[in-house]
Amino acid sequence: MRRIPPRGRSKAEILRDLEQFRAHDVDWRSGRTWAYVYDPGPEAEEVIKEAYMMYLSENGLDPTAFPSALQLERELVAMAASHLRGDENVVGNFTSGGTESILLAVKTARDWARAERPHIREPEIVLPVTAHAAFQKAAHYFCLKPVLVPVDPRTFKADPERMAAAVTPNTVLIVGSAVSYAHGVVDPIVELGKIAQERGVLLHVDACMGGFLLPYFRRLGAPVPDFEFHVPGVTSISMDFHKYAFAAKGASVILYRNAELRQYQIFTCATWTGYTMINPTVQSTKSAGPMAAAWAVLNFFGDEGYLELARKVLEATRYIAQEIERIPGLRLLGQPEMNLIAFTSDEVNVFQIVDEMKARGWYVQPQLGFGGSKENIHLSINPANVRWADALLADLRASVEAARQGSAEDLGALREWLAGVDWEHLTPEALRNLLSMAGVGSGLPQRMAAISTLLNQLPPAAAEKLLTAYFNDLYRPAGDPSRG
Ligand SMILES: *Cc1c(COP(=O)(O)O)cnc(C)c1O
């Protein structure tokens, strides 16, 4: 196992190593990666980095010691709340990301129900199948029961009738997305708000992805449905700065209709021997860097700057979506309401298309099939991607044809073998066997089509087991370099 080096090393050596570590990462700076990085361009990047570094060591733990952190947070929350049409009662907190915002919204709903609906013993959250997996993670962490509800099979939007039917006396929270990650569509929040009010439950709008840009798209004339705080029944909204506000990673916000509801989010502890513990969010000691960077980028672009960025990606998205529909063998899943596109094929294996695109220097994201949404390919269209639209489309056409010609991934033997797998007791040997049959050695796979095809065909519980075992193996302590 690797040890702490016996003597300190030079800055030059250290930075060279760090540079080498990322040689095999996706090359996001090229503009050929259509996921993961929300690239604001080099000028904004410089401002973000300087602001981040300036506040790197300031601690957001204690606002009495660092009033600057409190100031940044209050300004960010205010800008987010007014952007999402909140009135002066709306409150919120800065968090490390969409997942933390969602964890907090769910924990708050649970603790609200403990106080306001004390008869509920087994609280439930009603989720369209398109709601982000972070809600199921929150339910898992905080012991609520997730109730998954099918969506409209054509639009992939939540179906209000089915959502209403899923509400029981144990329901504490229902969820809608603006937009959903997978298909980039806005759920009918106005209808969900009516259900929430009629049934006396909370409604969280997950606007992690869409909250920031959708209001700009609306101003540009796009038909964006209402999803913000002016919709009656909406009680909380999450919005990520580190997606389409283009902030540095580690930046999101959770907003509540009023402070009365937000009180259930805050954890305080006066029963230990250390400093007085008051944590509004999950993290305790935290760098103020992400907050400073988010504040800096909002001030750098300003409202007009974001409107221009929105115009650019909206036009590119419409163009790419229209051209994809013209490629023989491809079709869109839903009609994108943001700069996210999901498309599939009924003729070729989409996972082979992903590998063919990778061989041509593009990263596009595969999504497995679930709940009426067929396996598909996902594109996030960033400002940095826009100039590559035609090149992407040309290679996409070529990749579909290559995938059509190529041999189908041979899963025959694998399928037979799978039938005999004991998923409850998956041994390390069985796992290695399984992965090598899918063409994955130890470490990270190069071609993903076989493994994706396999995962797509497994029952979800089996796929979860397999992925857990794989990651349990992947995150091993680094070896000792002197032993080779
Ligand atoms: C990205 C995303 C999340 C989760 O956010 P993280 O910042 O990755 O934790 C939640 N909901 C939606 C709709 C998202 O797109």
Image (cartoon, rainbow, N blue to C red):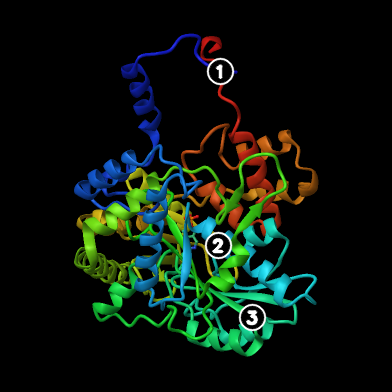
364 relative position to 131: left or right: left
Q: Amino acid at mark 3?
A: Val
Q: Look at mark 3 in the image and give the residue it sits on.
A: 201
Q: Quadrant of residue 201?
A: bottom right
Q: Earlier in the sequence, mark 2 or mark 1?
A: 1
Q: Look at mark 2 in the image and give the residue it sits on.
A: 102
Q: Look at mark 1 in the image and give the residue it sits on.
A: 2
352 relative position to 125: left or right: left
Q: Identify the residue at image location x=79%, y=48%.
A: 424
Position of 342 relative to 433 (above/below)? below
Q: Quadrant of residue 326?
A: bottom left
- Disc 2, ligand 1: is the CB inside 8 Å? yes
Q: Which mark is residue 80?
A: none
Residue 358: x %, y % from top left: 37, 46
**Placement of the N terminus among the 4 image quadrants:** top right
Label 3 SS = loop
Q: Amino acid at mark 2?
A: Ile
What's the distance in space between the residues labelled 2 and 1, CA to CA?
37 Å
> How many residues crowd mark 2 within 10 Å: few (<14), some (14–19), many (20+)?
many
Q: Identify the residue at image location x=32%, y=74%.
A: 215
